[in-house]
Amino acid sequence: MERYRLEEGIVVGRKAKPQGDLLLRFLTPRGSLEAVARKGQRPTGRAGRLSLFHHVRFQVYAKEEGLPTLTQAELLGRLHGLEEPRRFLLASFLAELAYRLASPEAAPRIYPVFVSGLRGIAKHENPLLPLVWAGWRVVKAGGLAPSLLGPGLRLAGGRLGEEGVYLGEKGVEALRAALHLPGGEALPYLEEAPLDRLFLALKAHAEEHLGPLRSAKAIGA
């Protein structure tokens, strides 16, 4: 097994340990990755480069047992705007969703959508719109797209029908656009759609397959 690996990706999770280490989660084009940064919280450590949603190039040392250890980290970029509380919470939901779905097979499709979604959440006047678009596209990239062939206006169990989250005609139309059209072409449909319902449907659909998403509670969904 290759001991040292060079990776590039987005910091999507960090937790300080009592001894000063950082437990980190990354989303990369090759999949989800967890690693430990030793003494990362100390002034001489790498904490400034390892903030949430920072784009970093990093090296890990993979052990036979336990988590890999982060040995180097280089900051490549950061998104301004996500420090706003509402935008931060929406970005956290998208990050958790993408991290949970980013298997090595799905990650090459998920990663560019995730990055595009973060940029939209950071800049768009209504950050819920890029979250809804990117969230549903991540679900599709992860192989969990719902079937939209039925006549109903509610979504449950991955199908349209008479039960579940009510989307209405504009909601169903916007969901079809988000799943099947490029972002620029889907935008007009989403601008006219009930975004709050599309988000609730996204949360419910994802949790049917993945279990509870902790970040959804903070948003109030």
Image: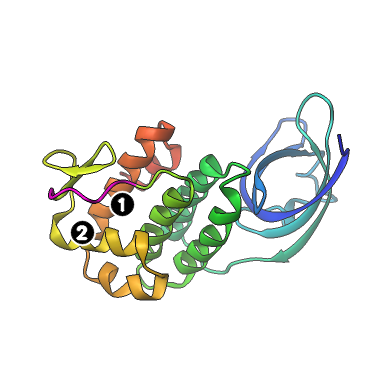
**Is residue 132 rendered to the left or right of residue 79?**
left
Asked which colour scheme the image uses, the reply is: rainbow
Quadrant of the rendered image containing residue 188:
bottom left
- Mark 2 sits on what residue? 171
Lower sequence index among marks 2 and 1 = 2
Badge 2 crowding class, 10 Å Cα cut-off, few under 14, some 14 to 19, many 20 or more, is many
Residue at image position (80%, 24%) is 65
How far is disc 2 from disc 1 in space, using C-alphas?
10 Å
The amino acid sitting under disc 2 is Gly
Which one is in front, 65 or 179?
Answer: 179
Q: Secondary structure at mark 1?
A: helix
State which region is magenta: 146-152
Query: Quick one: 5 or 200, which is closer to the camera?
Result: 5
Q: Nearer the viewer, residue 137 or 76?
A: 137
Residue 83 seen in the figure:
no
Residue sitting at x 44%, y 60%:
87
Q: Quadrant of residue 21?
A: top right
Query: Circle 2 sits in a helix, a strand or a loop, which is it?
Result: helix
Nearer mark to the viewer, of 2 and 1: 2
Image quadrant occupied by the C terminus: top left
- At x 52%, y 42%, the residue is 101
Type of the residue with mark 1? Phe
Using the image, tell me which numbered label, if any, was put on residue 11: none
Overall secondary structure of the magenta stretch?
Answer: loop
Give the residue pinned by disc 1: 199
Residue 203 in the image: state x and y as whole percent: 34, 43
Q: Quadrant of the N terminus?
A: top right
Percent x, y of residue 129: 35, 64
Q: Residue furthest front?
A: 149
